[in-house]
Image (cartoon, helix red, strand yellow):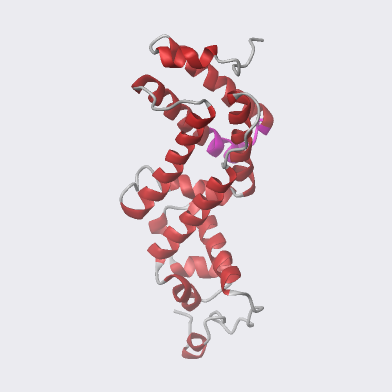
Amino acid sequence: MGATSQAGDDPERGAGARPARRRLTVDRRREELIAAALELFSRHDAEDVSIDDVAAAAGASRALVYHYFGGKQELYVAALRSAAAELEARLRPQEGGSPLDELSRGLARYFDFVEEHAAGFAALLRGGPANRAGEIGEIVDGVRQRLFRLVMNRLHVGVPGPVLRITLRSWIASVETAGLDWLEHRDIDRPELERLLMDHLVALLEVAARHDRDAEHLLEHPGRRPDR
């Protein structure tokens, strides 16, 4: 639309005779485009975001976006993969303390990501569950599976039975929802929210223990938080 043949010769220049941007490395330029895309995908459905929108948000030309990603689907996948990789890096286990203490630290690192990479977190969750097919579904499900394995590892659970599996996955869904709600409202202090979610986990395990001995054993573990 606004691009001329001269602008098209130089993907570093946008439409409308925008001054040439500073020279960046390939990786840094790619990161800028992904950051702009994540911000847009966090606020709009993917089908409502165009390459032109991403180019404008990044202060680049649409030719540059196509140069790096080939098209919107490739950009969307790359943006979600970037967010997923960053979140999973934050969740690498750090040993020490009781199982619930370790899980509490993991939850704090999760919310570090939520706070520092709000657009990436929101975009990642907007990628599911409605868009579970293909690469998008694999990325979103991969993050949830990683969280599920983290929780099981921290609680020293091998293969959970159906009651415990449903309980832990329900808690993970609550954590995701709480993260999105907190980003929207921010009307509760983050440490208080993290304590609430840990208490939520204990409460869920107490209910599960009435149906499954495995959950009851978890509550008997010395890592259980004391009653107040």
Q: How many marks?
A: 0
User: In the picture, residue 97 is in which quadrant?
Assistant: top right
The answer to whether 111 is drawn above or below residue 163 in the figure is: below
Q: How far across and down, in percent of the image, does residue 22 sit?
A: 66, 78
x and y percentages locating residue 191 in the rendered image: 68, 30
Instruction: Locate the N terminus by quadrant.
Output: bottom left
Residue 110 falls inside the magenta stretch: no
Q: Is residue 193 above or below residue 124?
A: above
Q: Residue at x 38, y 52 (%)?
A: 136
Depth check: give the residue in front, 3 or 63.
Answer: 63
**Magenta stretch prevailing secondary structure:** helix
| Residue located at (60% from left, 69% from top) | 28
Q: Residue at x 56, y 41 (%)?
A: 91
Seen in the image, is 195 located left or right of residue 142? right
180 magenta-colored: yes
- Which residues are drawn in magenta? 178-190
212 with respect to 55 (left or right) = left
Q: Nearer the viewer, residue 136 or 39?
A: 136
- Is 83 rendered above or below residue 210? below
Of the pair 118 and 109, the residue shown nearer to us: 109
Q: What's the residue at 48%, 85% (across, down)?
A: 8
Q: Nearer the viewer, residue 99 or 37?
A: 99
Q: Residue furthest bottom?
A: 6
